[in-house]
């Protein structure tokens, strides 16, 4: 299709044209239909500038002449009155016109408000009118990358995109973006998506200065070629990466700190690849340690003494909280790409073993829990629940059972929930429970018998009975559920419930999780609690808190806010700004639930915002660079959420 269609530039249409002349050429539809709003009148409009804006910002969702995408193909859809009203304030136009309501129902998203000036609106309209006469808009050709530039783009893809779209780009949390589909989206469309994001949850990497224009151009080209081969990581290399910095014999046998170490918080400084450790009682920072690249999360050992940090580069770091100042005692790299780690929590195995789940290669690795000495590397089965042969099968969420010597591991692409028995030699996968594709995050119910997890690309939640090692059920929720570890609380009408928010739906799905006392509600959605926007990543509560808190981090409009759902009524009590510099993300209570920490995720001026657990008033703000997750020792060790 490339080269077969003409562009406004290529066709050298008279530029700038006057909007009034373009309108006159199109006659009938202009301003008609009673959709309200005035067009640009006789203002001189620059169609070339409109085209440039369209290519840079709109082509991620709209094509001109190549078919519908996330929004409609805009060929012959332009109506001056409606378009200018819509471009000026999409929310207003959608809410207050019947046509707008129809559009919303059809597409399910509200277009972001680009805060366009009148001049920009006129330019875009002039471009759309003129292009209607020309026909489909040509694609900007893919730039040719040198070998070095390809490597650069590969690294950017790995660091920023592979988590959602897969190393081989077959999709999971984000859609499939193999070379064929990427080529259909085209250089401009890919660039626009990377630049401004999408209402479906793709972040606005360009607008938020995470990717430069140069990186966006290279990435848009990289995506239109086939994905490069990814390397294996054999046991010999894992062994070679192991560093024991403080042998067990040299570590303290009792806590060397007078502080309440069980209320420590480990906070992720994502881009710095560091963990800052805070005293949860005094809010003082007591240590900052180096961990893996773009560090993702922390987990606590069963005793709480150790933090395990996992970097996206697969580096596991063991941090000893009993030292007078918390320090790194061992590290090892078992994956090229990883998101999850956990320790052994069954009685008499506490702190003894550790599992690292890989995004790449398709394997998990187990270690000695006190030294991180590698013990076993286990390949994952490469067939999905539907019998499809896989090239990628990523380990997503991992939970550690307290009722058996096992870890439960989500296999994203395969759709199986695996049970790994660490009491057996080789830490084998002893069961593989067919669930749903593509499995992502999840956590325990309040009894820690049921593992409740999101198959987010299937818009379902899955319930696994870890005692019988079987699937209980899966059920529909909203678009792309994303619970983190979820939240458990006692609902006045439905007994124990668990809940997930969604990346793509503006509500929280609350479902019964009390098969013993409320079997009629178990694993059924009992409440759908509306939020002001979609784009949520996490939900969190604490047994002592009256609130269930939820963020809307990926929303383009409400990302500074947190909403508080009252457990007593099952309704949103209030939504309020928490972030001032960046986006509000991820909540974690202190040990007794009297305070809650929320990240203001920004490169500059953000940090941890500490709220009073009852009033939700701000107590303190600690400035930190690019801080995201934070983990309280007591709550993480005991799976309190
Ligand atoms: Fe996460 C949990 C994967 C992006 C912050 N994230 C998880 C889990 C998985 C996962 C599989 C569950 C781990 C477990 O319980 O064992 N995350 C991914 C991705 O694949 C994804 C979408 C893209 C990527 O490239 O990594 C991704 N995650 C992010 C972020 O951008 C976040 C918001 C910020 C950051 O620092 O990375 C982020 N993810 C978190 C946090 C948790 C998490 C804070 C743990 C929640 C909890 O309360 O336990």
Image: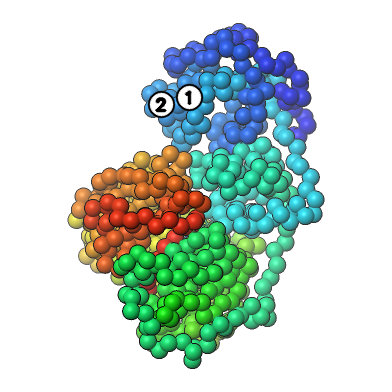
The relative height of residue 333 versus residue 370 in the rendered view (above or below) is above
Disc number for residue 92: 2
Q: Quadrant of the N terminus?
A: top right
Disc number for residue 552: none
Callout 2: SS: helix
Q: CA distance from mark 1 to mark 2?
A: 9 Å
The relative height of residue 490 versus residue 130 in the rendered view (above or below) is below
Q: Residues within 10 Å of mark 1 (few under 14, many from 20)?
A: many
Name the residue: 56% across, 41% down: 207
Callout 1: SS: helix
Near-viewer residue (401 or 281): 281
Name the residue: 64% across, 81% down: 239
Name the residue: 54% across, 73% down: 316
Name the residue: 60% across, 81% down: 243
| Position of residue 603 measured from the top left corner of the image (x, y, whole percent) | 51, 52
Q: Quadrant of the C terminus?
A: bottom left
Q: How many circles with numbers are drawn on the protein? A: 2
Near-viewer residue (116 or 463): 116
Residue tagged 1: 88
């Amino acid at each position: 299709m490339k080269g077969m269609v003409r562009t406004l530039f290529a066709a050298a249409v008279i530029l700038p044209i006057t909007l009034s002349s373009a309108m006159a050429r199109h006659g009938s539809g202009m301003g008609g239909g009673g959709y309200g709003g005035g067009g640009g009148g006789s203002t001189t409009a620059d169609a070339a500038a409109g085209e440039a804006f369209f290519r840079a910002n709109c082509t991620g969702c709209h094509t001109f002449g190549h078919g519908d995408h996330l929004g409609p193909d805009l060929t012959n859809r332009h109506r001056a009155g409606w378009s200018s009203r819509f471009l000026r304030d999409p929310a207003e136009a959608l809410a207050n016109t019947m046509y707008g309501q129809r559009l919303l129902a059809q597409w399910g998203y509200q277009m972001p408000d680009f805060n366009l000036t009148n001049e920009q609106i006129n330019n875009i309209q002039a471009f759309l009118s003129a292009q209607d006469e020309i026909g489909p808009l040509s694609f900007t050709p893919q730039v040719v990358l040198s070998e070095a530039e390809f490597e650069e783009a590969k690294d950017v893809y790995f660091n920023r995109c592979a988590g959602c779209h897969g190393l081989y780009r077959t999709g999971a949390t984000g859609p499939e973006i193999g070379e064929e589909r990427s080529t259909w989206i085209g250089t401009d469309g890919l660039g626009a998506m990377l630049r401004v994001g999408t209402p479906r949850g793709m972040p606005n990497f360009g607008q938020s200065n995470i990717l430069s224009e140069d990186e966006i151009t290279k990435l848009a080209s990289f995506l239109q070629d086939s994905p490069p081969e990814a390397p294996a990581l054999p046991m010999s290399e894992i062994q070679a990466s192991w560093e024991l910095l403080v042998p067990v014999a040299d570590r303290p046998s009792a806590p060397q700190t007078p502080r309440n170490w069980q209320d420590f918080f480990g906070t992720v400084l994502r881009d710095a690849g560091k963990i800052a450790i805070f005293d949860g009682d005094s809010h003082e920072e007591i240590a900052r340690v180096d961990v893996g690249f773009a560090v993702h999360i922390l987990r606590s050992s069963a005793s709480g003494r150790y933090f395990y940090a996992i970097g996206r580069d697969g580096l596991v770091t063991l941090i000893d909280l009993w030292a007078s100042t918390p320090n790194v005692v061992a590290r090892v790299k078992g994956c090229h790409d990883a998101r999850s780690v956990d320790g052994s929590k069954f009685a008499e195995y506490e702190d003894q073993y550790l599992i690292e789940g890989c995004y790449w290669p398709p394997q998990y690795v187990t270690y000695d829990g006190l030294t991180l000495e590698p013990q076993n590397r286990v390949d994952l089965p490469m067939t999905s629940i539907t019998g499809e042969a896989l090239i990628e099968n990523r380990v997503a969420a991992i939970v550690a059972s307290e009722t058996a010597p096992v870890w439960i591991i989500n296999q994203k692409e395969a759709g199986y929930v695996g049970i790994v028995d660490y009491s057996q030699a080789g830490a084998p996968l002893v069961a593989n429970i067919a669930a749903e594709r593509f499995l992502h995050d999840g956590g325990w119910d309040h009894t820690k018998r049921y593992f409740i997890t999101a198959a987010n690309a299937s818009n379902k939640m899955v319930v696994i009975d870890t005692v019988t090692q079987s699937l209980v059920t899966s059920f529909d929720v909203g678009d792309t559920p994303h619970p983190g570890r979820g939240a458990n609380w006692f609902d006045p009408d439905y007994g124990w419930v668990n809940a997930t928010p969604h990346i793509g739906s503006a509500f929280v799905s609350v479902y019964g999780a009390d098969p013993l006392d409320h079997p009629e509600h178990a694993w059924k959605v009992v409440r759908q609690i509306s939020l002001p926007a979609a784009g949520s990543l996490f939900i969190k509560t604490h047994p002592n808190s009256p609130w269930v808190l939820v963020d809307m981090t990926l929303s383009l409009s409400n990302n500074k806010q947190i909403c508080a759902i009252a457990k007593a009524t099952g309704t949103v009590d209030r939504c309020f700004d928490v972030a001032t510099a960046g986006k509000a993300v991820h909540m974690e209570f202190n040990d007794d639930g009297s305070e809650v920490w929320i990240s203001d995720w920004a490169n500059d001026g953000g940090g941890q915002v500490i709220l009073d657990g009852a009033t939700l008033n701000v107590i303190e703000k600690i400035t930190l660079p690019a801080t995201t997750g934070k983990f309280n020792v007591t709550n993480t060790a005991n799976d309190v959420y």
